[in-house]
Image: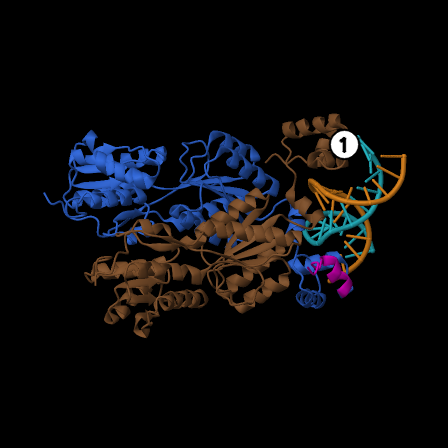
Chain colours: A blue, B brown, C orange, D cyan
Amino acid sequence: MPSPVSIKDLATAAGVSHSTVSRAIRGAGRVSAATRARILTLAREMGYYPNEAARSLVMGRTKTIGVVVTTIGDPFVTQVVNGIEDAAHEAGYSVFLSSSRNQADREMAVVRVFRQRRVDAVIVTSSRVGSLYGDALAEFGVPIVLINSQHEGRYLYSIAVDDTQGAELAVEHLLQLGHRRIGHIGSETRSVSCKRRKAGYRQALARRAVTPDPSLSVLPQAANDLSAGRLGLEMLLPANPSAIFAYNDVIAIGALLEARKQGIAIPDQVSLMGFDDIEATEFVTPTLTTVRQPKADMGRAAVEMVLALLKGDEVSNRWLPGELVVRESTTACPW
Amino acid sequence: MPSPVSIKDLATAAGVSHSTVSRAIRGAGRVSAATRARILTLAREMGYYPNEAARSLVMGRTKTIGVVVTTIGDPFVTQVVNGIEDAAHEAGYSVFLSSSRNQADREMAVVRVFRQRRVDAVIVTSSRVGSLYGDALAEFGVPIVLINSQHEGRYLYSIAVDDTQGAELAVEHLLQLGHRRIGHIGSETRSVSCKRRKAGYRQALARRAVTPDPSLSVLPQAANDLSAGRLGLEMLLPANPSAIFAYNDVIAIGALLEARKQGIAIPDQVSLMGFDDIEATEFVTPTLTTVRQPKADMGRAAVEMVLALLKGDEVSNRWLPGELVVRESTTACPW
DNA sequence: CTGTTAGCGCTTTCAG
DNA sequence: CTGAAAGCGCTAACAG
């Protein structure tokens, strides 16, 4: 390990003081063009890279953002992180990634670590933050931006998809296809956005004067989304829906798989759609109609919000619109 | 922002010197149990969190690992990062995540940033590192561990799946099902591991004294893996295979979709399998037989290797075995 | 335009 | 067992 060269090494090599070097490197303060150039080439030759830790220490900021996810495996989270990393990189920020696994102890640990690292801001994606966790983060005193939070109105700053609008879009699509008996499979674990999507579902029906049948709305309790979808389909079948709008794509795919197992043709007998637009929607047969969440954009938006907060600007919460993506799993009502 | 309390604040509050506080906090050096306890409770009350930047500065290490991925979106990468983050967290390390996008300028930028941040080590996952990039990383002087590198024998430290063994496992499975005309769809973009898997394919055939038919081995050139799979199937069809072993799952899924389009029944007419065991294997119909890469384990192994290197231990490269996962897309040869 | 000085928060000798 | 002092690499007044 060739111990890294410091500003001092450069200074002696260039025959100037270390503060002149500092100024030259940063391009701040006045330094004669000549010495500046000399220092810069010297820096390159000697392989100088400013020590960000030292800089952080004196400047009181780290140029890092702590990103908390429940699990990196979630296909939704992945794309959001992509957007975050991208925007952060552009702005000269680095990203600490940490997953909470929805475990209280880990959540606390993550907060502690971020605190010790003095991250300039925290972005939390799509987790139903436990209250402990939330408090710890809040008292931490740095900007916190939540993406698709499942925690109602506790925090100031958030980026989310417009669940209601997205759901309306979905159900409107089904209505236009002539469906009237439209089922809905909800999600136990994301109560807040589920509630909003269900509201959108109802509003879309209402606009067309379709009276909602309670038996067409189910809330399966299952180990994970895929099995929730399977269970949801079973629960819905007795109500005889011609179309189903699932809370999200994984649930929809679960329903799709179960339908196949039961010999129900999608979309010929039942149209089916989800929400999110995860990659797998293209892998299933039939490919899945869905409402796209602008995942990467949401990540970028979160970073923008963070930067604005760091600058001291006023910011307001943003609700990004969902976008209908029609694929093969929905078709005209057969009745 | 309540400016963070420092060791000094604690010192004055406790009526001791700041070095005593330092010792107490770390539990290092001798401090009387009494004062130690006093300081610790005080620390809790006042919300003290050691400033890791300051610590890094004096200790000459940051307890951070820089992780480079080509893109976070890749389902393989995702799980590896999961394992990395997990193991790093356990060891008290934080993870900087950065994606290179396979763009030369970004690759250089990532290295530069990691260098400035003085990460203690770098883990690079599944990228065919450009040579520039590689050199820059190498001269950086910290341990670098590569996971599934597509760069032959340039680096000392690597973790990879045993491509050859995995491929043998796959082809052996097909052979046991009675298949003899086994096609193979390769990957343009991952030449190194593709070569190894192909070697495994050949060895498995050889062991059963099946002479390989060159027309059964194709290397489609396509924009991405999914379309490579589609194209691969088309290229393979004239050779009349009863089974196909694709380089990876996404390619296999591409082939699967194309087969459906062409009215070819999988697995009744053609058995099909992939490699990796990504999530989507469970979403497709039929579900996909594959060779599981222990992705999270590979991530963990990389961290273990990093820690060993940091400790100055000798390490040797590891090849983790693949594991056969039989699902629905393979069945007995119909002929 | 450049050097001197102080100090960010912490660890680490070295004395006591 | 505890304190004093130095210094990690850098920025930021403040003089010159």
Q: Secondary structure at mark 1?
A: loop
Task: Reply yes or no: does residue A4 show up in magenta.
Answer: yes
| Left or right of A175 on screen, residue B163 | right
Q: How many marks?
A: 1
Q: Nearer the viewer, residue B306 or A149?
A: B306
Residue A97 seen in the current view: no
At a point 38% along the width and 65% down the height, the residue shown is: B204
- Neighbor class of circle 1 (other Cα within 10 Å; few <14, some 14-19, many 20+) is some
Residue reaching furthest to the left? A335
Compared with residue A107, is residue B251 higher up or lower down, i.e. above or below? Answer: below
Location of residue B44 by image quarter = top right
Q: Nearer the viewer, residue B261 or B224?
A: B261
Compared with residue A100, is residue B77 higher up or lower down, i.e. above or below? Answer: below
Q: Position of residue B329 (x, y in %)?
A: 28, 55
Q: Position of residue B308 (x, y in %)?
A: 62, 52
Location of residue B259 by image quarter = bottom left
Residue reaching furthest to the bottom? B214
Residue B304 seen in the current view: yes
Task: Reply yes or no: does residue B187 show up in magenta.
Answer: no
Q: Quadrant of the C terminus of chain B?
A: bottom left
Q: Nearer the viewer, residue A5 or B182?
A: B182
Q: What amino acid is at disc 1?
A: Val
Q: Position of residue A8 (x, y in %)?
A: 75, 58
At a point 68% along the width and 64% down the height, the residue shown is: A43
Range of residues picked out in magenta: A1-13
| Left or right of A275 on screen, residue B141 | right
Q: Nearer the viewer, residue B295 or A326?
A: B295
Residue at numbered disc 1: B31
Q: What subunit carries mark 1? A: B
Q: Position of residue B161 (x, y in %)?
A: 46, 58
Q: Quadrant of the N terminus of chain B?
A: top right
